[in-house]
Image: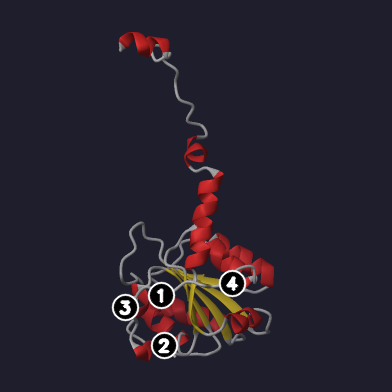
């Protein structure tokens, strides 16, 4: 056995080049497969794809990103693509911060709200402030709005409020892949063909 190892060259130590280790472990075809699976999972449970995409071209429309520490790539890409103003709040936003943001957005009456869950291990409910969760509930009752959940499906029912007004899109997790899926959906490049894996109370949806 030792002779075989020597013949195979294992007796000569060669250090591993770790400078491109992440790329070596995440090959292009693996990344493409993950993106395809993420695209297929994207689920529209309220509203229509046509109205969602058309609303992005209408005046008095704004983007709102919640639960983010810094502007995500999705915020920059959607804002740039559709020439829309973008606003954001951290997940522990206070009533004062929410009211201040609402004052800044008085001229807008149609909102695309992106609800992020940046936790390494997402749970069945969002760890947002009570005030921010209450505002999400209010946004969800308007037919003018679209809520995009970058979180698992259980967070919808955990909101404890009706979402029977707004369009609702869910990507099940917060990652560069799901951000890309949502961006491509809004641009009309893919459809939201996923199926909701959990049952929501009837009063939550149309």
Earlier-in-chain disc, 1 versus 3: 3
- Which of disc 3 and disc 2 is earlier in sequence? 3
Q: Mark 2: which secondary structure?
A: loop
Residue 117 is situated, as x and y percent measured from the top left of the image, at 40, 65
When asked about the image quadrant of residue 151, the answer is bottom left
Asked whether, in this view, residue 149 is left or right of residue 182, the answer is left
Position of residue 52 measured from the top left corner of the image (x, y, whole percent): 59, 81
Residue under pointer 1 = 196
**Viewer-side residue, 147 vs 65:** 147
**Up-down relation of residue 191 to residue 77 (above or below):** below
The label shown at residue 158 is 3
The CA span between labels 1 and 3 is 15 Å
Numbered disc in front, either 2 or 1: 1
Determine the image quadrant of residue 8.
Answer: top left
Q: Give how far apart the Cα atoms at labels 4 and 3 are.
A: 26 Å
| Element type where label 3 sits in the image | helix
* Tag nearer the camera, 4 or 3: 3
The span from disc 4 to disc 1 (Cα, nearest Å) is: 28 Å
- In the image, which disc is placed on residue 86? 4
Label 2 crowd bin: few (<14), some (14–19), many (20+), radius 10 Å = some
Q: Distance between the residues labelled 2 and 1?
A: 12 Å
Point out residue 114 in the picture as x, y percentages from the top left corner.
50, 72
Res 178 seen here: no
Q: Distance between the residues labelled 2 and 4?
A: 27 Å
Which residue position holds label 2? 205
Q: How crowded is mark 3: few (under 14 residues within 10 Å), some or many (20 or more)?
A: few
Foreground: 119 or 42?
42
């Amino acid at each position: 056995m030792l002779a075989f190892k020597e013949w195979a060259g294992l007796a000569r130590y060669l250090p591993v080049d770790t400078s491109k280790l992440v790329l070596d472990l995440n090959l292009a075809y693996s990344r493409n497969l993950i993106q395809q699976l993420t695209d297929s999972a994207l689920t529209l449970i309220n509203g229509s794809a046509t109205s969602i995409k058309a609303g992005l071209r209408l005046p008095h429309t704004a983007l709102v990103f919640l639960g983010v520490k810094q502007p995500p790539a999705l915020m920059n890409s959607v804002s740039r693509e559709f020439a829309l103003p973008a606003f954001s709040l951290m997940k522990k936003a206070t009533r004062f911060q929410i009211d201040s943001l609402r004052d800044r957005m008085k001229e807008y009456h149609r909102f695309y709200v992106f609800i992020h869950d940046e936790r390494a291990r997402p749970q069945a409910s969002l760890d947002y402030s009570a005030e921010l969760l209450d505002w999400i509930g209010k946004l969800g009752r308007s037919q003018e709005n679209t809520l995009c959940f970058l979180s698992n499906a259980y967070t919808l029912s955990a909101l404890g409020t009706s979402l029977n007004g707004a369009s609702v899109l869910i990507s099940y997790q917060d990652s560069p892949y799901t951000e890309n899926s949502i961006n491509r959906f809004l641009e009309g490049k893919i459809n939201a063909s996923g199926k909701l894996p959990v049952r929501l109370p009837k009063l939550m949806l149309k």
